[in-house]
Image: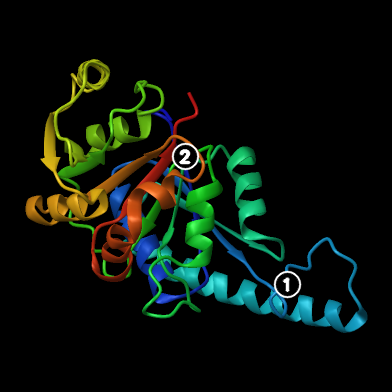
Amino acid sequence: MTRFMDKHILLPTDFSKNALNAIRYTLDLFSDERCEFYLLHAFTVNGFSLEGSPMTPAQQYTFEHERDRTRVQLEKLMGMVRLHPKNPLHSFHSMVTGRDLLFVAKEIIAQKNISVVALGTKGATNMDTQVFGTKALELMEHITQVPVMAVPPTANFMGIRKIVLPTDYGSPFHAVTLRPLLDMAYQQAASIHVVYISSKPRLNRQQQAIKEELSKILDHHHHSFHILEHDDVAQGIEGYMAMHQSDILVMMRRKQGFFKKWLGQSLIQQLGAHSKTPMLTFHDNG
């Protein structure tokens, strides 16, 4: 991801209010950067992705009807997005598919040199009590090539001044891996708050060494280190973000299963159900 090149941003949408809000938030976040946005809708027929599969005549008719209906919806959405507000640095493309969203998203990421994927935390079919929608969780869990940003329904972009990066100092950091975080801090002139939360707040020798290396990587950015004693990591992060009025939570995934194991339901409920704070996740592919 290079600061001086156009960004290519993938915006999956299901035409819900949350999806529209996520699109608007993303346009505002990148308002000062030259970007190409790809609005993608993946539709199903009776809950199945049929494109590329053998279909009966009835299924073929239903598939084509749904595809045409979706194209009309997407063109209407494109008209709304282009006027929010009109930005000469932004251009837009629309894409409709009858295939699985995750499969198509990975394909587009590779073909279009996508920099980031942004979507709403909940879709049109998710209940109010459900925190993250199934598709949002799926993309956050399985897209490893680029960062994925999940935007809660009530999030309003007011600038990003405080970025929270939780860590357990369990593995070394690399500048290349942290590039999405460093770029955001640079573009938004934001401070990076590195937060370590544990019932045993004293760092061991290895953790201290990792912290010192991270400090070198963050040297050209305003940053600070914080250690909080708390038995529940998720509640600790949640409390820190609320106390410091943080603007975005950045989670670096190091291995499969980390997302569900380390975050905990408390933090996810806060972010997905009530918080105005988006979450940016990316994988350590180094």
Left or right side of 61 for 135 = left
Residue 21: percent from left, percent from top = 35, 67
Q: CA distance from mark 1 to mark 2?
A: 29 Å
Viewed as shown, does residue 238 lie left or right of 134?
left
- Residue at point 24% right, 15% down? 209
Residue visible at 89% across and 73% down?
55
Q: Amino acid at mark 2?
A: Ser
Q: Position of residue 175 (x, y in %)?
A: 35, 21
Outermost residue, left direction?
Answer: 243
Q: Secondary structure at mark 2?
A: loop
> Toward which corner of the image does residue 66 lie, by quadrant?
bottom right
Q: Nearer the viewer, residue 185 or 48?
A: 48
Q: Amino acid at mark 1?
A: Phe
Residue at image mark 2? 115
- Classify 2 as above or below 260: above
Classed neighbour count for the residue bearing mark 2: other residues with Cα under 10 Å, few (<14), some (14–19), many (≥20): some
Q: Is residue 186 above or below residue 246?
A: above
Lower sequence index among marks 1 and 2: 1
Residue 211 is situated, as x and y percent measured from the top left of the image, at 22, 22
Query: Looking at the image, is mark 1 or mark 2 nearer the viewer?
Result: 1
Viewer-closest of 223 and 10: 223
Mark carried by residue 48: 1
Neighbour class for label 1 at 10 Å: few (<14), some, many (≥20)?
few
Q: CB atoms at circles 1 and 2 under 8 Å apart?
A: no
What is the x, y in percent for residue 285?
Answer: 50, 29
On residue 262, the disc is: none
Whether residue 204 is visible to the viewer of this picture, yes or no, is yes
Camera-nearest residue between 70 and 92: 70
* SS type, badge 1: loop
